[in-house]
Amino acid sequence: MPPLYELRIYNIYPKDIKSFTELSIKWMHLRTAKSKLLGYWLSELGGINDAVHIWEYESLSDRARVRKELSADESWVTNYIAAVGPMWRRQENSLLTLKQGTHLNISNVTAGGVYELQTLPDGSRVGSLLPGTTLLAAFQTTFGQVHKEYFDCCIMLPWMMQSRNIRCSLEGVSGDVITRLMSPAPWSTLQ
């Protein structure tokens, strides 16, 4: 069975961004010890004050096991969740799978890049790769409310770009597209 991915987006109150970042740097190791973090980013454009992260699981049962272990981890709950929970203005999550015929492409990611997450209607043609960009994955939503108001099913495309001056191509993409420009959080596996 192929892995499942959970996209989580937390909107943080502007006054709490610094504290959220400091607490996450200090305590996120407790979370990453339980399951694989694909990447964690802080959104700069297209979703200001958003923390965007993608976690990998073997199955829904694996996700349930991780959630149960985290809720039983007193240090995680007391030192992190109790502190950052009030900083969250909104939380969203969605279950993703890799789009058929695609794979993760994270082995060649180099430090110092910025990231763009594109959300496209299912059936859209993926834009072309431009010099300096790397398509990390093509995800398809399978469950959740992330952008449900726009699409019944959508494709999520995280890109790594070597510079903020590079834009991923949306040429030939039809329908509504949601994009966000993101910087990797200090504790992200993808820098």
Image (cartoon, rainbow, N blue to C red):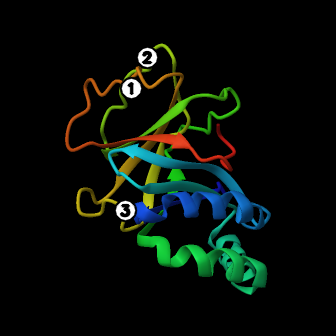
Residue 78, quarter of the rendered image: bottom right
Name the one closer to the observer, 25 or 98.
25
The structure residue drawn at horizontal position 37% and vertical position 62%, both measured from the top left corner, is 146
Numbered circle sitting on residue 168: 1
Q: Is mark 1 on a helix, strand or loop?
A: loop
User: Hey, which quadrant is residue 164 in on the image?
Assistant: top left
**Mark positioned earlier in the residue sequence (2 or 3):** 2
The circle on residue 146 is 3
State how far apart marks 2 and 3 are (Cα): 27 Å
**Percent from the top left, x then y, of residue 161?**
50, 26
Which quarter of the figure is the N terminus placed in? bottom right
Give yes or no for contact between labels 2 and 1 (Cβ–Cβ under 8 Å): yes
Q: Nearer the viewer, residue 174 or 47?
A: 47
Whole-percent x, y for residue 48 in the image:
36, 51
Which mark is first along the chain, 1 or 2?
2
Q: Is residue 51 above or below residue 185?
A: below
Find numbered disc 3 in the image and state the secondary structure of the residue it sits on: loop
- In the image, residue 187 sits, relative to residue 116, either above or below, namely below
The Cα–Cα distance between marks 3 and 1, rounded to whole angstroms, is 22 Å
Residues 97 and 132: in front is 132
Residue 21: % across, % down? 59, 57
Q: Residue at 65% of width from left, 54% of height from top?
A: 2
The quarter in which the C terminus is drawn is top right
Determine crowd level at label 3: few under 14, some 14-19, many 20+ residues with C-alpha closer than 10 A. many
Which amino acid type is marked by label 1?
A: Cys
Give the side of residue 181 with respect to residue 63, left or right.
left
Q: Which mark is residue 77?
A: none
The residue wearing badge 2 is 130
Q: Which amino acid does label 2 sit on?
A: Leu
